[in-house]
Image: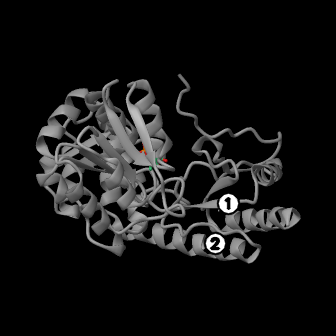
Amino acid sequence: MAPYTLAEFAIPAGQRLISLAQNESLRAPSPRVARAISNHVSQLAQYPDPEWKELRKALSQLHDIDQQSILCGVGSMEIIQCIAHAWLDASATVVTTQYAYAFINTVARYTDANIEHVEEDAFTVSIDNIIAAADENTTMVFLANPGNPTGTRIPRAEIRRLRNNIDPDTLLVIDEAYAEFSDQCDDYLFDLTGSTQTVILRTFSKAYGLAGLRVGWGAFEASIAEQVRKLLNPNNISLLSQVAATACVQDQAYMLETCRQTAYLRDALINNVKGVGLEPPASQTNFVLLPFESAEAASRVDAQLRQQGMVMRSMAGYRLPHCLRLTIVNQRDMDFVQENLLSAIAEEC
Ligand SMILES: Cc1ncc(COP(=O)(O)O)c(C=O)c1O
């Protein structure tokens, strides 16, 4: 069974690596993180809080949700993995989107579940198509909103419509790893987790800039939380990771500024590549999907940037071999990336 593949970072010796492949934040986390970590070093002889109390309290205040409905994981990947172990087996069916986040394919594979990829509409999730595909035998509907690798987003009202039109027993998992980049667009969905078989997942790896510390969380309906909790490692999140994530929640201004800088640089990139003939989908995230004329053109541009240390993500694994995915990085690196990218694209035209 093929494992989940991470980015390939080989670059010529002597080049400085600019990673454009993993959708990490363009800047370090809030300065409060370093202070909070140094204040807790003296406690490192102890195990972490298995109930993540401070972190849950901060999240519940921020999002106005019940602390009991929150579970935290070693990245949202740990939570996705536990949900898969609890719900999926060879008799299960997962309905997901055409360009679904690749990790759902991995967990479906290792649980032997059947997986159905439902056609999107110009790189955008089609709720009508998902409703048509899901039936009473569907175990789980999984979708990322905004999507990875497309970057596109559908209004949360559409997710409510989906919930209302699929079987009440079907587990609906909405992965909102990139939601902070577009939260202001409309209402939250956390209320759905109180009354329906719905899970909303979030992460500290993107807008909060904590990918290195591995913290994710989700809001769950009580009976689902109970099952998933049994499968999480009881001491899963390190003490320093909990403290750091809590400090991030308490500095919303910093996170929002990260999102603002990201959106500014992202929209400039989108305009510039449109200027040389590419048509990327409208991204609401910290990355942009770049569709080229052919797989060969994409791989030539990829190789050219890699020669100079810039590593984008090949999309062949998403059945999009003619596309590359590019993470938005800080202004200085972005200027260098754009200069090289635009000239590589121009050579293709
Ligand atoms: C849609 C989506 N969900 C989940 C994750 C994993 O996040 P975490 O770092 O919290 O495990 C990613 C990471 O790229 C992602 O793109």
* Residue 216 at x, y percent in the picture: 35, 45
Work out whether residue 148 or residue 138 is closer to the camera in this orientation and state it. 138
Residue lying at 53% horizontally and 58% vertically, measured from the top left: 150
Q: In terms of sequence position, does the residue under pointer 1 or pointer 2 come before the other?
A: 2
Work out whether residue 192 or residue 64 is closer to the camera in this orientation and state it. 192
Work out whether residue 179 or residue 144 is closer to the camera in this orientation and state it. 144
User: Measured along the vertical axis of the image, is residue 270 above or below residue 324?
Assistant: below
Residue 213 in view (yes/no):
yes
Amino acid of disc 2: Ile
**Is 308 left or right of 127, judged from the image as shown?**
right
User: Measured along the vertical axis of the image, is residue 255 above or below residue 69?
Assistant: below
Give the spatial CA distance, label 1 vs label 2: 12 Å
Whether pointer 1 and pointer 2 mark residues with C-beta atoms closer than 8 Å, the reply is no
Q: Which residue is the site of mark 2?
A: 270
Label 2, secondary structure: give it.
Answer: helix
Label 1, secondary structure: give it.
Answer: strand
* Residue 293 at x, y percent in the picture: 75, 60
Residue 203 in view (yes/no):
no
**Is 270 left or right of 15, judged from the image as shown?**
left
Q: Can you tell which quarter of the image residue 74 is in? A: top left
Label 1, ligand 1: CB separation under 8 Å: no
Residue lying at 37% horizontally and 71% vertically, measured from the top left: 253
Work out whether residue 47 or residue 138 is closer to the camera in this orientation and state it. 138
Label 2, ligand 1: CB separation under 8 Å: no
Q: Which residue is the site of mark 1?
A: 291
